[in-house]
Structures are given as structure tokens and as C-alpha cells.
Image: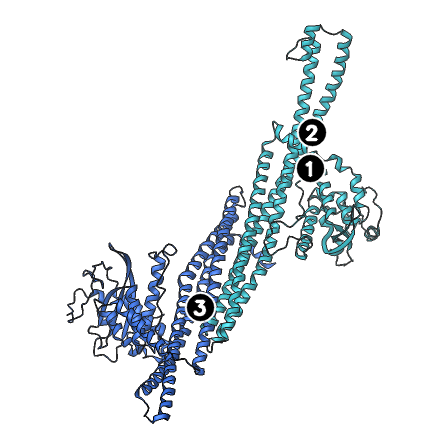
């Protein structure tokens, strides 16, 4: 991926991105904080946590590193985002990185650095740098779902992990989770509607999120109650949405199968490596009792050892990069299905009310009530949003899987490329003999 | 010098009619006369091995049924041995090969004969009797066609090794094995080789009780233990590795199926997924050929596993010969001592005779004379025995040492080649893997 030339931001009167100071180097620059927003940035200042506990920040990453990362994301998404604001007009960049462990008397948890760069006027400042924990991401997602019921909200990595089974603080777990959170935030930031949601704004820029989780929970319960109380049942789902539903079911199934296959491969590979190591040691010990044959025997032993190492790397890559993405897509599918169901609900409500209204109209000639029209609007809105989101989702899915599968192919190729040179190296001195053998 | 008269079969007559002297079993090179009648000496120096005069191969295998020793019906496999005179081939004539069928048990009989008759030679081994070190896909069934095929190759290898050995190739029984289908077994038994075989018990006892075995042989024996241990460990580990590798490759085949199913619900991604799936299938299938090739490598290791035993047998023979020499020498010494005691009346060492003499008085002079005479005879015999045993032992040491050196060189060469072959196989496997995944990657990029 080549870093292209920095693009000037068309819609802003502000400086091009390269001249915007890196948020973490903003220590020197005095940025006047707004009335209700505090800037946290800079290496020396402590960025406050949402609960106020001061925490150490990392040393500032180099400006070029952050820039490159942003640029990279740009290129990755470039092909796909036909339905998006084109990259020239993208004006909101977010990144999740730099995990840190926090130990307090009450609990231990991880926070991540959320960096924002934007030219949007909805934001007071061009850049922000906040520390957020998983809870905060969860809050954001719930808020988005509530406030944008007709849209598909990207999924978060799994919330609950069984203590004792998974180490919540292991490097791999944290790394995997962080990548998923980064993806989540980027997807939201790239969405033409979701990215303007005030909750996202708060998440990216506010010191205190004012979460009031309890209330949020109540709201959620309230909504679902509302739906059930309506008691409307959908008669027929329109064919296009049927097709979507079927596709999602089959797709989820296939992903599940691929997940199982990948896990099986990992298991087989791990057992293979165990046997291979033993195999290599036999060659080494045999070499000890030979004279003429020592070199070739040690050569083969070396080959085998290299193969083991290469294979272990491959397995690690698969479990770190491949499986989590698969699983995340399964969650994504679940979200999509939920949205479909909500759409069904709103359609059911509309049809129900319409039927009732028609009956009443026939009886006493009252005009169509406003609620029915509102419902109709709602359904049409929902359908349109859903279709647009669906296209976007399909397009992203294609890109994501293209990248994922190509990555796996690359890793496998690398694995072979790592160890066959060792075979070549030890046997090359016997070139003449080799030629004779190869000729036959 | 003609060999002992074998019944002239049709085949041999044919060979004779070709104008060749059929005394190939000896060092007689009368069949090497050049056109002008002068002798070609070129072959004599290297030991006129049979293989130089005769093309040998084990061409086929067939199933037969018949009654065995206890009149029970059984199925067994026979192998076709084909031979052709080498000079006929060299001259461009292509006579039909002579051929006969032999069972595995007949090969075993031949080998046992060779082991007994040439105890100073590291006799080439036969392919395994039963399939061992099997990984799960291969069957351990002796009737399995792959096993039979590999055995055919192993038997041919055995014959080629024996027929090219400077000493073994001159053996008459070997020659008859290759040329006389019927009556060969009787001829072998007639040699009485079975009686000459050393009893296991004697051999074992010699190993423990021998005092001064040749150091080089002891080292060689120790080496044979190491060789056996390492090759068998390697074969076991390899079988386990093969099993696992098979699993890894085959599971990838599942990708093929699921990609195909998935492609059915996709629009733009469909083609790419479908083709990639085919490549995954190809990947899974490729392991069969890879592991089949590796079986050949395993067979080479198995040969040397068996060779280790043959090497140890030669060392044990030395121990036995040395032990028998030591026993004979010891016996001679003790008899000489007895003579001395009788002659001088001085008892050097404690003996029962001496005690009884003291207690009951010595025997009469006539008795003493008789005893002395007997002793003298025994001593003379004993001296002969010691001479014989010494010659036996020394000859064995000399000849065995030569053959062990020859074996060592052969082993180094063969195993080095086998290991290089193995590296070549590994490289090829890598290249195939890279190819398949590159193809899959192309398909993914087109998704």
C-alpha cells in the first residue's frame, strides 16, 4: 500500500492534514478548551479517564506513524466506498490504539487511546485524543442503536469472556479486541448518517460521557416493551427483504463452517509440529554417531526445525488475524438480522394500524389518522435506509473478505518460503549428486 | 571348472546354445573370450560379479493358491524373476528373458543359506516380512497391492545387491536360485547348511564370556546397535509425522466444499470463491503423491535397519570364533598342566587328583603311563584344534573386516543419497504448496 500524496480537504477552510499537528504533540500548542469540553493531549498532561482517575499516557507516537496509519486506512477503503463520500471529502478520521492497563482498588481494566482528526464543524476542535474502555464503546453502540433504529450498527467484539478460560489481560486478547474496536469505530465514522450522531461526537470528544447506564437500560427495555405491546404481526415480508434474510442465514452458516475448519486446521497443525520436533531430534542424535553422514543428517534436522518455526508462526497468524474477523462477521450478521426484524416490526405496526383505520373509516368516515401516515413514513424510511445500508454492507463485506482470504494465502506462501531455502542450503554442496538425482 | 552338475533345464541349454559357457557361478571367465579368442581380463580384478554377466530383475507379482505344509488352502504371492545374459544385451540382441517364479519364503531360505555359509559377510537384507511403521492410511495387509509392489522392488534390490557382491555373487546356490525353478530347495537342503548354523544359545553365551574380542569388532557391534536404534526411531517418528501431515492437508479439502457452497449465494464474489475452492481441493489431494514418494525413502531406511542386524551378526560370529579359540586354548593349557603334574608329581594347582593321591597314595606306574599317553594324544589333538580355531578366527577377522569396510562405504553412499533425495522431496513439496496458494490468492484477488 503506497502512501499517496496528502489530499487537501475540500470542504474545510483549514490547513491540509499534514500541517495539522498530531494530537499528541499538541502539548506545546495552547488549544483553548471549549466551555464543556476538555482537551486531553500531549505527552506530559494526564488524559483523564471518564471516571476521573488519572492515568499515564504513552509517549507520543511519531506524527508520521499516525499519518501513515490514517493514509493506509484510506487506501484500504478506497475501492469500496463508491456509495460513500469519496476519499477526497472524507473529513473524519478515527483510530483506536495504545492499550493500557489500569489498576485501581475496585477493579483492573484496559483503556485504549481514541484519536480523532476532523474538519467537521459539528466538532469544536480539529483533533481529540481520549482514553476509552470497552464499557464506553458498549455505551456508544447502545446509544446508536436506540437513536438510529433504522440503521445497521456495526458489531462490537464479544463483551463477556469467561474468566479463567481467557486471560483478559494477555497481549493477544487485548490486541485482538483493540483491532475489533478500531474497526467498529471506523465503520461508524465512515457511515454517512451514523457519523453525525451526537453520541459519537460525545464519545470522541467529551471528557465525561455521562453514561448513566441505568437509564439507558430502562430506555432499551421501554422500547422493546413498546414493540411487544403493539402486538402487531407481520404477514408477509417483501421479497427483497426475504432474500436478504435468507442470504444472512446461509452466510452465517458458511462462516460458522469456515470457523470450524480453521480451528480444526490449527489443531492438526499443532499436533503435526509436536511430532515434527521429535522427528528432528532423532536426526540430530543419529548425526552424533556418524562421520560421513553427519553433515547431511544435521542438514535435515535443521530443515525440520525451521519448518516447525514457520508452522508455528502460521498458526499464530491464523488464530490472531483470521478467526477473530470471521467471528466478528457472524456478530455483524446478527446485527443485520436484528435490523431486519425491527423493520418487519415497523411494517407490521403500519399495516395493523392501517387496517384498523380503514375499518373505522368505513364505519364512521373519519379521515386517515396522523399516526397511520407517520407509520407509513417510518416504514418507507426504514426500507430506504436498510437498502442503502445493505448495499454498503455487501460492498464492505466483499472488501473485507478479499483482504482476509488474500492474507491467509499470503501467510501460507510465506510459511513455505521460510523453510525450503534451508533444505536447499544444506543439500547444495552435494550439487553434483543432486544433479544426477534430479536428472533421473 | 564346471559347477556340480545341475539338471540341464531347457533354459540352461538355451544359454549353452548361445555359445556361452554356463559356468558363471565361479571365477571362470571363459565366457569372456573376445572375437579373436583372447581372454578378456577386465572383469576378473573387480570380482566377476554375477550382475556383470546377467541382467536380473523381479518383474511381476502374482497371487496363487495352493495347499501348504499342513494341507490347508492358502493364498500367497509369487514373484517373477527374469534373467538375461548381459553380453546378449550388450550386443544388441534381445533374447527373451529366462524366468521363474519364487515365493518370499524361498528368498528367505536363500538368505539363511548365505548367512550360514558366509558368516564373515554382511548379507543384504530382504524387504520386511510384515508391514511395519505403518501410518494410518497405509494398510498393514500383506496382500495389499501397494505393499506387494514395494516388496517386489525390495526383492529385486536384494538380488541386485547379492549378485553384485564380490563374494556372494559367485555362489552356486544363488545361481541356481535364479535359474532352476524346480528342485532348488532340495539342492539347498542338501548342502546341509542348517547343521552348520550356530546355536543361538552358544552365540549368546560367547557374547558374555569372551575375554579378548577384537576391539574394532566391538566398536562395530556398538555402531550396529546405534544404527538400529536410530533408524527404528526415525521410522517410527516419520510414520507419526506422515499421519499428522495427512490430516493437515486433508482438512483443507473442506475449504473447497464450503467455498463452493458459499459461492452459490454470492454475486461478484462467486467466481473467485469457486475457483479458490478448486485449488483447496487440489491442495488436499496433493498429499497422497507426496507421501507415496516418501514411502520409498522409508524403504531405504528400513533396508539399513535390517542391515544393522546383519552387521551385528558378523560381529557376533567373531565373538563366537574368538570364544571358541579361547576355550580351546584354555583346554590345551589345562591338559598340559595335567601332563606336567603327572610327569613330575608336583601339583601346582589344587586338584582333586592331587588330594586323593596324597590321601590314598599314588597309582601304579602302568596306570600313570597309560594316562600320560592318553594325555599326549589329547594334547596333540588340542594343539590341532587350537591351530584350526586360530586360523578360523583370523580368517574370519580378515575377511569380515574387508566386508565391513565395503559395507560402511556402501552405507555412507546410499544413505547420503537417500537424505539428499529427501531434501529434494521437501523442496518439491514446498514448491507445490506455494503454487497452490498463489493460485488461490489470484482467485481471492478477483473476488
Note whether residue A214 is visible. Answer: yes
State how far apart marks 1 and 3 are (Cα): 64 Å
For numbered disc 2, what is the local secondary structure? Answer: helix
- As drawn, the chain in blue is A
The x, y position of residue B251, in whole percent, is 52, 62
Q: Are marks 2 and 1 on the same chain?
A: yes
The image shows residue A244, relative to residue A415, as above or below, that is: below
In the picture, residue A115 is in which quadrant? bottom left
Q: Are marks 2 and 3 in contact (CB under 8 Å)?
A: no
Residue B189, percent from left and from top: 78, 40
Q: Position of residue A418 (x, y in %)?
A: 45, 58
Q: Nearer the viewer, mark 2 or mark 1?
A: 1
Is circle 2 on the same chain as circle 3?
Answer: no
Mark found first going from the N terminus, 2 or 1: 1
Q: Is residue B90 above or below residue A34?
A: above
Q: CA distance from mark 2 to mark 3?
A: 76 Å
Mark 1 Cα-neighbour bin, 10 Å: few <14, some 14–19, many ≥20? many
The residue that disc 3 covers is: A405
How many numbered marks does the figure carry?
A: 3
State the mark number for residue B119: 1
Look at discs 2 and 3 and give the one toward the viewer: 3
Residue A77: which quarter of the image? bottom left
Q: Is residue B247 left or right of residue B303?
A: left
Q: Which residue is mark 2?
A: B391
Amino acid at each position: 500500500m503506497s502512501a499517496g500524496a496528502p489530499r487537501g480537504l475540500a470542504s474545510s477552510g483549514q490547513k491540509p492534514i499534514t500541517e495539522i499537528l498530531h494530537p499528541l504533540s499538541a502539548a506545546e500548542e495552547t488549544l483553548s478548551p471549549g466551555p464543556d469540553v476538555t482537551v486531553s493531549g500531549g505527552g506530559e498532561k494526564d488524559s483523564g479517564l471518564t471516571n476521573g482517575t488519572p492515568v499515564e499516557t504513552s509517549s507520543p507516537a511519531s506524527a508520521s506513524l499516525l499519518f501513515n496509519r490514517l493514509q493506509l486506512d484510506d487506501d484500504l477503503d478506497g475501492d469500496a466506498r463508491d456509495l460513500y463520500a469519496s476519499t477526497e471529502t472524507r473529513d473524519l478520521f478515527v483510530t483506536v490504539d495504545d492499550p493500557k492497563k489500569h489498576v485501581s482498588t475496585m477493579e483492573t481494566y484496559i483503556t485504549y487511546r481514541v484519536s480523532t482528526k476532523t474538519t467537521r464543524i459539528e466538532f469544536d476542535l480539529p483533533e481529540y485524543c481520549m482514553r476509552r474502555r470497552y464499557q464506553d464503546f458498549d455505551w456508544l453502540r447502545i446509544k446508536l442503536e436506540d437513536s438510529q433504529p433504522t440503521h445497521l450498527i456495526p458489531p462490537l467484539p464479544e463483551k463477556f469472556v469467561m474468566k479463567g478460560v481467557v486471560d483478559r489481560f494477555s497481549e493477544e486478547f487485548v490486541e485482538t479486541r483493540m483491532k475489533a474496536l478500531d474497526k467498529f469505530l471506523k465503520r461508524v465514522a465512515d457511515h454517512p448518517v451514523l457519523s453525525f450522531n451526537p453520541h459519537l461526537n460525545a464519545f470522541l470528544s467529551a471528557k465525561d460521557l455521562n453514561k448513566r447506564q441505568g437509564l439507558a437500560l430502562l430506555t432499551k427495555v421501554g422500547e422493546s416493551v413498546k414493540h411487544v405491546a403493539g402486538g402487531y404481526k407481520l404477514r408477509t415480508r417483501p421479497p427483497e427483504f426475504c432474500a436478504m434474510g435468507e442470504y444472512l442465514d446461509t452466510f452465517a452458516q458458511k462462516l460458522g463452517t469456515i470457523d470450524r475448519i480453521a480451528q480444526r486446521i490449527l489443531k492438526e497443525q499443532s499436533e503435526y509440529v509436536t511430532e515434527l520436533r521429535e522427528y528432528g531430534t532423532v536426526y540430530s542424535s543419529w548425526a552424533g554417531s556418524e562421520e560421513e553422514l553427519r553433515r547431511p543428517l544435521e542438514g535435515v534436522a535443521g530443515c525440520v526445525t525451521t519448518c516447525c518455526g514457520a508452522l508455528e508462526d502460521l498458526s499464530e497468524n491464523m488464530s490472531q488475524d483470521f478467526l477473530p474477523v470471521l467471528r466478528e462477521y457472524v456478530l455483524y450478521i446478527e446485527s443485520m438480522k436484528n435490523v431486519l426484524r425491527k423493520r418487519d416490526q415497523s411494517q407490521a405496526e403500519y399495516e395493523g394500524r392501517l387496517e384498523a383505520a380503514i375499518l373505522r373509516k368505513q364505519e364512521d368516515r373519519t379521515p386517515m389518522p396522523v399516526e397511520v401516515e407517520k407509520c407509513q413514513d417510518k416504514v418507507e424510511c426504514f426500507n430506504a435506509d436498510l437498502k442503502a445500508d445493505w448495499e454498503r454492507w455487501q460492498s464492505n463485506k466483499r472488501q473485507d473478505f478479499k483482504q482476509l482470504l488474500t492474507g491467509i494465502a499470503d501467510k501460507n506462501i510465506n510459511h513455505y518460503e521460510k523453510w525450503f531455502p534451508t533444505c536447499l542450503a544444506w543439500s547444495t554442496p552435494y550439487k553434483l549428486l543432486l544433479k544426477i538425482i534430479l536428472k533421473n | 571348472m564346471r559347477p556340480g552338475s545341475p539338471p540341464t533345464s531347457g533354459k540352461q541349454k538355451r544359454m549353452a546354445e548361445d555359445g556361452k559357457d554356463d559356468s558363471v557361478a565361479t571365477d571362470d571367465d571363459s565366457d569372456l573370450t573376445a572375437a579373436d579368442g583372447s581372454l578378456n581380463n577386465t572383469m576378473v580384478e573387480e570380482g566377476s560379479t554375477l550382475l556383470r554377466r546377467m541382467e536380473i530383475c523381479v518383474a511381476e507379482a502374482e497371487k496363487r493358491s495352493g495347499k501348504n505344509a499342513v494341507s490347508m488352502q492358502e493364498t500367497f504371492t509369487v514373484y517373477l524373476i527374469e534373467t538375461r545374459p548381459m553380453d546378449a544385451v550388450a550386443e544388441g540382441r534381445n533374447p527373451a528373458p529366462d524366468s521363474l517364479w519364487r515365493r518370499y519364503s524361498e528368498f528367505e531360505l536363500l538368505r539363511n543359506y548365505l548367512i550360514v555359509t558366509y558368516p564373515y559377510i554382511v548379507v543384504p537384507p530382504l524387504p520386511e516380512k510384515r508391514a511395519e511403521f505403518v501410518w494410518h492410511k497405509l494398510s498393514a495387509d500383506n496382500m495389499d497391492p501397494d505393499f506387494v509392489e514395494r516388496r517386489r522392488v525390495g526383492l529385486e534390490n536384494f538380488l541386485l545387491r547379492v549378485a553384485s557382491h564380490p563374494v556372494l555373487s559367485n555362489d552356486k546356490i544363488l545361481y541356481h536360485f535364479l535359474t532352476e525353478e524346480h528342485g532348488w530347495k532340495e539342492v539347498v537342503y542338501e548342502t546341509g547348511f542348517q547343521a552348520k548354523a550356530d546355536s543361538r544359545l552358544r552365540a549368546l553365551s560367547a557374547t558374555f564370556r569372551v575375554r579378548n574380542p577384537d576391539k574394532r569388532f566391538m566398536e562395530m557391534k556398538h555402531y550396529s546397535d546405534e544404527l538400529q536404534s536410530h533408524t527404528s526411531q526415525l521410522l517410527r517418528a516419520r510414520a507419526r509425522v506422515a499421519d499428522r501431515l495427512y490430516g493437515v492437508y486433508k482438512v483443507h479439502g473442506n475449504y473447497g466444499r464450503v467455498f463452493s457452497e458459499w459461492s452459490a449465494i454470492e454475486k461478484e464474489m462467486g467466481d473467485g470463491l469457486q475457483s479458490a475452492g478448486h485449488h483447496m481441493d487440489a491442495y488436499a489431494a496433493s498429499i497422497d503423491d507426496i507421501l507415496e514418494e516418501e514411502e520409498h525413502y522409508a524403504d531405504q531406511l528400513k533396508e539399513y535397519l535390517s542391515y544393522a542386524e546383519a552387521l551385528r551378526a558378523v560381529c557376533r560370529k567373531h565373538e563366537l570364533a574368538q570364544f571358541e579359540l579361547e576355550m580351546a586354548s584354555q583346554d590345551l593349557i589345562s591338559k598340559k598342566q595335567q601332563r606336567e603334574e603327572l610327569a613330575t608329581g608336583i601339583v601346582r594347582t589344587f586338584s582333586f587328583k592331587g588330594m586323593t593321591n596324597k590321601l590314598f597314595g599314588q597309582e601304579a606306574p602302568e596306570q600313570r603311563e597309560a594316562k600320560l599317553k592318553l594325555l599326549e594324544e589329547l594334547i596333540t589333538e588340542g594343539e590341532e584344534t587350537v591351530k584350526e580355531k586360530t586360523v578360523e578366527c583370523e580368517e574370519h577377522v580378515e575377511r569380515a573386516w574387508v566386508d565391513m569396510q565395503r559395507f560402511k562405504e556402501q552405507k555412507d553412499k546410499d544413505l547420503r543419497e537417500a537424505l539428499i533425495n529427501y531434501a529434494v522431496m521437501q523442496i518439491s513439496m514446498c514448491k507445490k504448496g506455494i503454487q497452490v496458494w498463489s493460485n488461490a490468492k489470484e482467485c481471492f484477488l478477483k473476488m
